[in-house]
C-alpha cells in the first residue's frame, strides 16, 4: 500500500475501529471460545466486536495457531486489516542461543547479528512479525535479575550489540518485506536499568546529563539501525511514569533520538500509571499515555475503555488517535501484511537451516564462556583422565536461560550426556550422596568438575536478589571439593555475576558459562578438555561484595580519588572494609594462550576535526596454542566541560592468533570518538589532551597521550 492509501484507510475507520488498533491482546482472547471466559479475558470485559478490532496480539506460540487466529480475525474484521503478531524472541526462537549477557561476553557483534538473523528466520516461518528485542538498558547492578537480558555496563559495547541485534532481525536491507525478517523493538525506554537497589519495577532517579551520557546510547544505536518499535519502561523519569512522560517519549525519543516508528507500552504499564500515583482513574491514565505518545497499550484496556469518551468530551483530539493508528498501519504496511496477512507461514526451515542453527548455537556458546580463574594452568584437563562431576546443574537440560520460549530443555543435552558423548570417563556424585561426598579423595580422578550457579528461574524478569552467593548446598559441595585435595574446576551457570569470594578463592579454575543455550553442554566440555580455547570477556564487572554495587569501570574521578589500592589517606573516596576494585574488571577474561602487547605507536600525536590518527599495536601469541584475543582501546579526556570517566571504551577488535604469531592491530581515532555530552545535553568534542590505554581488559595502564587541536 502507498502512504496515501493508508490515509484513505484511516478515513474509512470508525473511532472504535481506530482505538481497536491501539490495543494489544494475548492469544487467549482469541482462543478461549464463548463458553467460559475467565482470567484476563474476563477482567478486560471487552466485547467480541472489540476483540476483532484489536490491532496486535502477543505471545502466540505456533504457526497453525497464528494461521487460525489471523483467518478468523480477518473474517470478522470489517475493513480486513490484518492482525500483527508479536512475541518475546530474546535469545532465539527454538534454537536457543546464549542469554544476551553471555552474547555480550563474546565481544563479537557479527556473531550477535547472526544469532538474531537465525532467530528472525525461525520467527518468520512461525508467522511472527515483531520481536520484543533487543533490550539495551544499561545496567550496573547485578542484583537486578534482568541483567541477563542486556549487554553489560558499557555504553559503547551496548551500542555495538544493539545495532547488531537490529541488523540481524531486520535484515541486511532493512526491508521487512524481505523473507526471514522481523521488526525489532528496542526496550525498555528509558533507563530501566537504573532501578534503585536493583529491585524490579522500582524507581529510577537519574539526571538528564547521565541519561544522555550513558543510558541513551544503546537505544540511539538501535534506532539508528532502523528499529521499528520502542517499548516504554515501567519506571519513572523525573517523577513521571515513563509511559505517561511527554519529555521522555516525545522530546527525547522523537525529537532528540529521531525515532519515527511505533511506541508500545510494556505489559500493563498504562494501567500502572494509577499505581504510580500520577493518575487516579483509567481515563486519566489513557489520556496521559496517549498524550505522551504511546501508540499501543499492551495488556491493559484503558484506551479501549476511555479514549472515545475523552474525544467526545473534547479533551483529546482525534488527530492524536489518528497519529497513533497511522503508526500501526504503517508498521503493518512495512511488513507487507496487507498484501500477505499470512506472511511467512508457508515457508519452512530446511534441514540445512537447522544444522546451521545448531552450529551457530555451539559457536555462540563457546565464544560466550569467560575463564576468570586458572591457577597454575589448572585447565585444560587431559581428556584421557577420569574426572569427578558434582552439582545438580550437571544433570539437567535446563540450561537454556530465562527467555527460551520455545526451547526444549528435555531435548537439550546435559553436561553428563555431553561427557558421555565425548567419551570422557567420569563419576557423577549426586548432591544427596553424602557418603561419596565425604570421601571424594577416595574416588579416582585428579579433578572435580563442580557445576554451580543459580537456577534459570532465578534470572530474568522479577528475579531481583540481595544475596548473590551460592546456595548452602552448593557451598557445602565447594568446600568438600576444596578439601579433597583434588583440582577444583568450578563452572558457573548464572544470569549475572555471582558475588561469592569462596567460588573464586577455593577453585583452581572458574569458567563462567551463564545460561548458554541449546549447545552449551558441548561448549563447556570441549573447553574444559582443551578443544576450544576460551575467549569471552566480561561485559560487566564482577564485584567483590554486594556493598560495592553499583560498580563500573567507567566511573568518574571524584574530588578525592583513591590513587592506589593501598592508599593510606583516610579522606579519599574508598571503603574502610573493602577494596574499591571489583574482583574481575570489565573486559577481563583469560585464554589458554598468552598474549603479549608491544609498545603502541601513534601515527601522529595530534588529530583535528578533519584528520584522524592511527594507533598501532603488535600483539603476539607467545604460547603453543592458537587463540582469540580482544584488543580493547580506552581513552580518558584530561579535562572536560563536565567530568569525564577515568576510562572509556571507544573501540575493540577480536583477533585470532596462531601459536607465536604476531599481528598488528590498527585503530583509527577520529574526532567523533572524542565527543561527549556537555551540560547543555549536546554531544560534541573539546580541544585538549587525552590519554589512551590499549590492552586485554579495562584494568590496563596508560600507554600514551594525544591531543585534539583545531589545526595540525
Ligand atoms: C514485560 C517485560 O518487561 C517486557 O520485557 C516483555 O517484552 C513484555 N513483558 C512482554 O512479554
Image (cartoon, grey):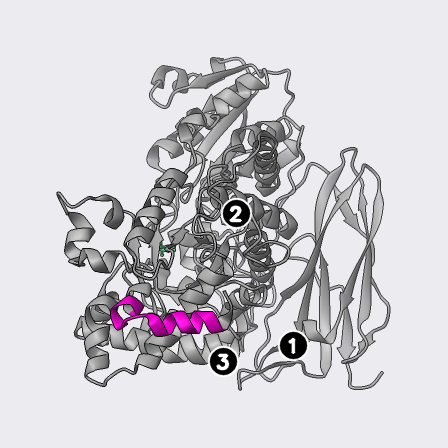
Dot 3 or dot 2: first in sequence order is 2
Write down the residue under mark 1: 675
Q: Mark 3 and mark 1 in contact (Cβ < 8 Å)?
A: no
User: From the viewer's perspective, is residue 389 above or below residue 669?
Assistant: above
Residue at 27% across, 56% down: 52
**Magenta part, dominant SS:** helix
Which quadrant would the C terminus be assigned to in this image? Answer: bottom right
Residue 190 is tagged as none
Residue 120 is tagged as 2
Res 138 seen here = no
Say whether residue 16 is magenta. Answer: yes
CA gap, disc 3 and disc 2: 30 Å
* Residue 384: quadrant of the picture: top right
Query: Measured from the top left, where is residue 378 in percent x and y?
Result: 62, 30
Residue at 42% across, 65% down: 329
User: From the viewer's perspective, is residue 335 above or below residue 515?
Assistant: below
- As drawn, the residue found furthest toward the left would be 36
| Callout in the foreground (3, 2) | 2
Tell me the crowding category of disc 3: few under 14, some 14 to 19, or many 20 or more residues within 10 angstroms, Cα based: few
Which residues make up the magenta segment? 4-18
Say whether residue 360 is magenta. Answer: no
Residue at 41% across, 31% down: 409
CA gap, disc 2 and disc 1: 34 Å
Residue 255 is tagged as 3
Q: Nearer the viewer, residue 625 or 303?
A: 303
Amino acid at each position: 500500500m502507498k502512504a496515501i492509501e493508508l490515509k484513505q484507510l484511516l478515513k474509512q475507520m470508525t473511532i472504535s475501529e481506530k482505538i481497536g488498533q491501539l490495543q494489544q491482546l494475548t492469544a487467549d482472547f482469541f482462543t478461549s471460545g464463548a463458553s467460559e471466559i475467565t482470567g484476563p479475558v474476563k477482567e478486560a470485559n471487552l466485547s467480541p466486536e472489540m476483540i476483532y478490532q484489536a490491532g496486535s496480539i502477543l505471545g502466540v506460540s505456533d504457526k497453525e495457531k497464528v494461521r487460525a487466529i489471523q483467518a478468523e480475525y480477518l473474517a470478522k474484521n470489517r475493513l480486513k486489516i490484518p492482525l500483527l503478531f508479536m512475541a518475546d524472541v530474546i535469545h532465539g526462537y527454538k534454537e536457543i542461543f546464549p542469554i544476551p549477557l553471555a552474547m555480550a561476553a563474546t565481544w563479537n557483534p557479527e556473531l550477535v547479528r547472526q544469532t538474531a538473523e537465525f532467530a528472525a528466520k525461525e520467527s518468520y516461518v512461525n508467522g511472527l512479525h515483531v520481536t520484543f528485542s533487543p533490550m539495551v538498558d544499561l545496567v550496573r547492578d547485578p542484583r537486578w535479575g534482568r541483567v541477563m537480558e542486556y549487554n553489560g555496563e558499557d555504553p559503547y559495547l551496548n551500542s555495538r550489540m544493539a545495532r547488531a541485534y537490529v541488523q540481524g532481525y531486520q535484515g541486511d536491507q532493512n526491508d521487512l518485506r524481505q523473507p526471514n525478517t522481523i521488526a525489532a523493538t528496542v526496550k525498555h525506554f528509558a533507563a530501566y536499568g537504573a532501578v534503585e537497589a536493583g529491585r524490579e519495577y522500582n524507581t529510577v532517579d537519574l539526571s538528564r546529563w547521565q541519561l544522555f551520557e550513558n543510558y541513551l546510547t544503546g537505544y540511539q544505536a538501535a534506532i539508528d539501525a532502523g528499529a521499528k518499535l520502542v517499548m516504554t519502561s515501567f519506571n519513572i523519569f523525573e517523577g513521571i511514569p515513563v509511559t505517561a512522560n511527554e519529555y521522555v517519549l516525545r522530546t527525547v525519543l522523537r525529537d532528540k533520538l529521531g525515532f519515527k516508528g511505533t511506541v508500545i507500552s510494556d505489559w500493563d504499564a498504562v494501567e500502572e500509571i494509577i499505581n504510580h500515583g500520577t493518575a487516579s482513574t483509567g481515563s486519566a491514565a489513557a489520556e496521559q499515555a496517549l498524550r505522551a505518545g504511546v501508540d499501543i497499550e499492551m495488556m491493559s484496556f484503558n484506551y479501549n475503555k476511555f479514549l472515545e469518551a475523552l474525544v467526545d468530551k473534547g479533551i483529546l483530539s482525534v488527530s492524536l488517535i489518528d497519529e497513533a493508528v497511522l503508526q500501526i498501519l504503517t508498521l503493518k504496511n512495512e511488513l507487507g501484511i496487507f498484501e500477505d496477512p499470512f506472511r511467512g507461514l508457508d515457508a519452512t526451515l530446511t534441514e540445512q537451516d537447522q544444522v546451521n542453527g545448531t552450529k551457530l548455537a555451539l559457536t555462540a556458546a563457546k565464544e560466550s564462556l569467560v575463564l576468570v580463574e586458572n591457577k597454575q594452568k589448572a585447565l585444560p584437563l587431559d581428556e584421557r583422565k577420569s574426572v569427578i562431576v558434582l552439582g545438580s546443574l550437571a544433570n539437567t537440560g535446563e540450561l537454556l536461560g530465562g527467555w527460551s520460549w520455545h526451547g526444549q530443555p528435555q531435548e537439550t543435552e546435559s553436561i553428563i550426556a555431553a561427557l558421555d558423548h565425548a567419551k570422557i570417563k567420569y563419576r557423577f556424585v549426586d548432591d544427596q550422596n553424602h557418603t561419596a561426598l565425604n570421601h571424594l579423595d577416595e574416588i579416582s580422578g585428579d579433578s572435580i568438575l563442580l557445576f554451580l550457579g543459580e537456577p534459570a528461574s532465578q534470572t530474568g524478569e522479577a528475579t531481583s536478589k540481595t544475596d548473590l552467593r551460592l546456595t548452602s548446598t552448593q557451598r557445602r559441595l565447594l568446600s568438600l571439593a576444596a578439601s579433597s585435595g583434588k583440582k577444583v574446576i568450578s563452572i558457573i551457570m548464572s544470569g549475572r555475576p555471582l558475588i561469592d569470594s569462596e567460588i573464586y578463592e577455593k577453585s583452581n579454575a572458574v569458567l563462567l558459562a551463564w545460561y548458554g543455550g541449546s549447545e552449551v553442554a558441548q561448549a563447556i566440555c570441549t573447553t574444559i578438555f582443551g578443544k576450544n580455547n576460551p575467549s569471552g570477556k566480561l561485559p560487566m564487572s564482577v564485584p567483590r561484595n554486594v556493598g560495592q554495587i553499583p560498580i563500573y569501570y567507567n566511573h568518574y574521578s571524584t574530588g578525592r580519588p583513591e590513587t592506589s589500592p593501598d592508599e593510606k589517606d583516610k579522606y579519599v573516596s574508598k571503603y574502610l572494609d573493602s577494596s574499591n576494585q571489583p574482583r574481575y574488571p570489565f573486559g577481563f577474561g583469560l585464554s589458554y594462550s598468552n598474549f603479549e602487547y608491544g609498545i603502541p605507536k601513534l601515527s601522529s600525536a595530534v588529530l583535528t576535526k578533519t584528520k584522524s590518527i592511527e594507533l598501532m599495536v603488535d600483539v603476539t601469541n607467545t604460547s603453543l596454542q592458537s587463540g582469540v584475543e580482544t584488543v580493547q582501546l580506552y581513552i580518558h579526556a584530561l579535562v572536560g566541560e563536565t567530568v569525564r570517566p577515568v576510562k572509556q571504551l571507544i573501540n575493540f577488535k577480536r583477533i585470532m592468533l596462531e601459536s607465536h604469531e604476531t599481528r598488528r592491530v590498527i585503530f583509527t581515532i577520529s574526532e567523533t570518538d572524542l565527543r561527549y555530552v556537555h551540560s547543555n545535553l549536546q554531544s560534541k568534542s573539546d580541544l585538549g589532551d587525552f590519554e589512551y590505554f590499549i590492552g586485554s581488559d579495562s584494568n590496563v595502564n596508560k600507554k600514551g597521550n594525544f591531543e585534539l587541536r583545531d589545526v595540525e
